[in-house]
Amino acid sequence: MILSLLIFLPLIGALVVALLPDNQHIPFKWLTLGVAMAELLLSVVAYTQFDQQQAGYQLLEQADWITLPLGNLGVVSIDYLLGVDGISLPLVVLSSVILLIGVLSSWTIENRQKAYFSLYLLLSGTIMGCFVALDFFLFFLFFEFMLLPMYFLIGLWGGPRREYASIKFFLYTLLGSVLILLVMIGLYLSVMDPVSTAVMAGLATDAASVDQDLIRLVQAQLADMHISSSQIVHTFDLRYMADGGNYLPNAFLSGAGETTFWGIPARMIAFWAVFLGFAIKLPIVPLHTWLPDAHVEAPTPVSVVLAGVLLKIGGYGFIRIAWGLFPDGGAQYAQTLAGLGVLSIVYGGLNALAQNDLKKMIAYSSVSHMGFVLLGVASLTSEGINGAIYQMVSHGVLSAMLFLIVGVIYDRTHDRRIDSYRGLLQVMPHYAVLTAVAFFGSLGLPGFSGFVGELFTLMGGFQSLWLPGWLPSVAVSGIVLAAAYLLWSLQRMFFGPLWTRDGVESTLTDLNGRERLMLIPLGLLALLLGLLPNVLFNLSNATVAQWLEKFNV
Amino acid sequence: MINDHVFSLQLVTTLLLLLPFTGFPVLLGVGKRLAGPLAVCLTGGGLLLSGWLAMHMPEAPVALSTSWAGLTGWNLPFSLRIDTLTVMMLLVVHFVALLVQLYSISYLHNEPERHPRYFAYLQLFVGAMLGIVLAGNLIVLYAFWELVGLASYLLIGFWTFKPQASKAATKAFLMNRIGDAGFLIGILMTYRLLHTTEFSLLTGEAGITQLPAWVGLCLFMGCVGKSAQFPLLTWLPDAMEGPTPVSALLHAATMVAAGIFLLARIHPLLPPDALMVVAVVGTITALWGGYSALFQNDIKKVLAFSTVSQLGLMVAGMGTGNVSGALFHLLTHAFFKAGLFLSAGAVIHAVHTQDMREMGGLRKALPSTFAVYAICTAALAGLPFFSGFLSKEAILSGAFAWAGEQGSGIAWLIPVTLLLSSGLTALYMARQLQLVFGGDGRYTVPHVHGPDARMRIPLFLLAALSLFIGFSVNPLSAHGSWFFALFGAEEAEGPVWLAPASLLLALAGGWVGYRYAPGWITQTAPPSVWVRLSVEYGFLDRFYHWLIIAPVEHLAALTKQHDEAVAKEQAAPKSSHVIRSVYHAERGIVDGLVRGLGVGTVVLAHIVHAFDRLIIDGIVNGAVWLAAQTGQMVRSVQNGRIQSYVTAAVVGLLALLWWLL
């Protein structure tokens, strides 16, 4: 129930806002704020109800949604299936925090409030849906729906080149979606639902009586082709897709890998297709070029949500779908994949170093930091995967902070060029301190969450049996680059005598209460996670340990 | 009984770390009058606790540990270790930090509004430094190691309005980061190979597995950065932009010695090949620092390079297998160098300049400062009856003994170079003493006022600790000194002529420095290449710019241009034109790189270039075409109405299903 609420509360909110008359007196932002706070409360309740010792999915909700018998072709069954585990719950909590901060950051939106907040709520609901959906079809629906509000939020409330940026964002992500869609259909055709199939095949009277032994029996019968195709119930259930026993023999994506294209097993192609689909989202070099454009044009709150939450869907997709459903692909190409992660770390870092636009620099630093996520996942070690989840949460908090910081200066002067400012510390001391906190947190200073994320993903890279030692060694150069671009900016913008390019010193006021309310909690959160990493590791550890069993050789 | 003891050890170490780390935020919030005294009390309390530890020293090293980050079947503990070395470092850090803070109250009395921030940063430093010496494994050590870097950054850039200061702070942090990147690789490789980074397991009774030389050298990189060894030494002279008491504490006595401490911790893991490199790096640094100090005009820069040189000597001592000798020098150096910096601070405080050309004759105006300076200089130069003589002899004897064992003539270069560089020490220090205190006054301030009591007490204490008597009964040999007994080591036996020879060298150097060197600054003609070699410390900064900074900047610009070209191409696909412009843009960069990096980079650049062409020609064009086509198709449907989008999505999906089935 609680997960459904997480999804539908904002969706209903979006509908309500959309149906309300467009009137100046209606407090759309307060309404949205209320929903966001309720979301945070709900996710905290979900957190407390979650049993951290247990590895499997919890808080499950299941309902038949679409069932369509197709005669000889089996039965189409799409479920409304929700649940969380140690991989998704941290991201759900993160999302509710960032979305709440995003509402506060939207406070200054004056123009077309009704449409803005309606879309924002729609975005919130679809993000939550992505993280809690366990039916691939349902996941895909949310994944696609996310595009829509995002497209308009950038395209209508963005900067001067907003139309170009939003179209580019849309097309890139759509390309990824198409790849994911194709694989989803392939998987659907290759996987059965053992419980319903047992019922259909007459092995059980009803779904409730199916236990593990019976599932194994059904799987054995399936492997021996004792079940006729009309009795097989196909499914989009990610839990069943992750179990190799549920794949139909001779099917398109079956584990035996008999179907090949140009000599490459279909499963490997499918792995790369979903990998690319999510790699665009993360993003991974060279599929990252939409990100700086989208960030530069997006209004501050949308940047915050984009960097803080949306990118994480890429990393989540890696763990849940790309690696989770195709462990053989993850293992076989571990080195190449980790190499792509390292490339992102270094390329993103170098690019950040060359930027003069503060927002673009931070956008590229996101590319670099997300590279650590891929490195951690590709390492296939407990340290690496837990570290990747950690890095996602940590980056969510810190990048939200960084984009808010850009927003603060942009609100005041409409100029984001680093070399337009000197000595800001003199007039904006609180801003300077919080910027320093965010920068040092991002460059991996111990005590902040960034350190733990980078340390563990790197440790995973070094511990991995699949990777050579030099690969993570190259990744370490990322921490030098991060220190270089962040500290260099800090030095140029904040220290020395006060100076601005356009003589706008008088507009430079220090943080107001609302800005503090956004930045200080995020800074404290980064500190808390950095000092007590077990808060998060306890959550993810059991699930990751079970997840890794797929890779035991 | 034993449990009680462990419990009290836990309590004391926890308190030791808590005092400064709670002091940091608290001091940021207190009033400006309270900050200094409160900080002194905190560090004084820490000193008492360290004294208690010294009195209740456990016989065997004690490891304390709690879980910090735990995963299935694996735990990264927050572990601490207490042994002789820890306790010695605890005492040194607290003692010097206490004196420096006491001194700072007077030194910064003109800017009381900055006191809270200043003392808070110092407490942050003390806490981080204690973390380093208490760390029980390499990862905990690395965490505090980075925090010390932060404290150093904040304190070097303390005067935020000075552009030079913030530049120096950034430079210090970045150069240290380069070293730390190597250090981190070393730590994680150690973990990969030995499955632990706990000191108790790495070097305990279970036996010692030596690391491969390259991993050992990665660990050593941490020391190269933090202890300003060649080639990462240029941040230390720049760090002198910070307040002088900070230079005394961080950049002379304690923080820069952390690298030496690290070497002492990991020494057993380093194979002979790696130790050879360590010795060579230390020796080069000793000479490089000594020569660079010769022609400096800034009173603090001379001391900074002398610190570089002395750290090189310690590292060379480590490299030649003489751990206890190097640690002995760390100890004596902490006192006399802190004494020198604090007296230099008193001089700067009095004459309001750091330029030695505007000093002179201060022996009359500042007699007590002069006395302290002279004593500490004697210790630094290694004159008999002073502490530095004992510890330098310990390192040099060890180096000569080591060279004898190597059985190769080249090995003798190391002790001989070290001996020469200690002769240089006497030279540049005598020059400095003469320039600052000798001759006639060249200063412009009308009234020179000496240090007050709060500044004088630390100076006298440090001068007293620069005498031989605290360390050994015999003024001419540390043989049988409590120090070596404590570490269970014997002082290495060097050749008989070593002590007379080094004394002779010191006297000769001192005489040249006193008689001739002061004249080296009055020349107005353009400086000769030898002078510039010293003043610009071997042109290292230019070299970095040429070798690292410029190529990285080029590479960064290259990636930026590449992305911009891709974006441009996507915005308006006119491929031929864009490719040509990218090609020309990158040609310019490639040319720059060729100048910067030579033939090797050309190859790399061509690869990058080919890669770019491939991407732009192939993938991007394809993607753009596809995107444009899709865009055309989608645009009509994409009219913003959710319902139609859903309908289209579902219909499309079903159609696709139908087709596939």
Image (cartoon, coloured by chain):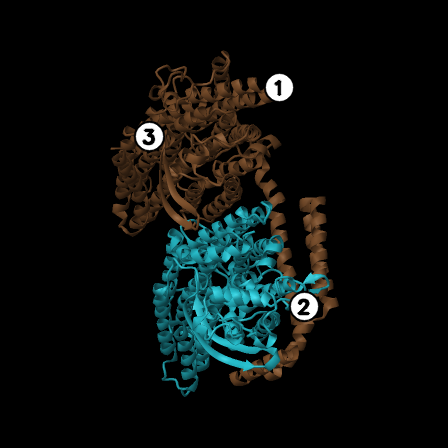
Chain colours: A cyan, B brown
Q: Position of residue B504 (x, y in %)?
A: 49, 15
| Mark sitting earlier along the chain (2/1) | 1
Which of the chains bears the disc numbered 2? B
Q: Which residue is mark 2?
A: B569
Q: Position of residue A546 (x, y in %)?
A: 47, 57
Residue flagged by tag 2: what amino acid is it?
A: Glu
Residue flagged by tag 1: what amino acid is it?
A: Gly
Q: Secondary structure at mark 1?
A: helix
Question: Is residue A532 shown above or below A508?
Answer: above
Q: Which residue is mark 3?
A: B459
Of A42 and B624, nearer the camera is: A42
User: Marks 3/2: CA distance?
Assistant: 68 Å
Q: Residue B409: which disc?
A: 1
User: Marks 2/1: CA distance?
Assistant: 64 Å
Question: Is residue A435 shown above or below A168?
Answer: above
Nearest to the eye among marks 2 and 1: give it.
Answer: 1
Which of the chains bears the disc numbered 1? B
Residue A303 seen in this snapshot: yes
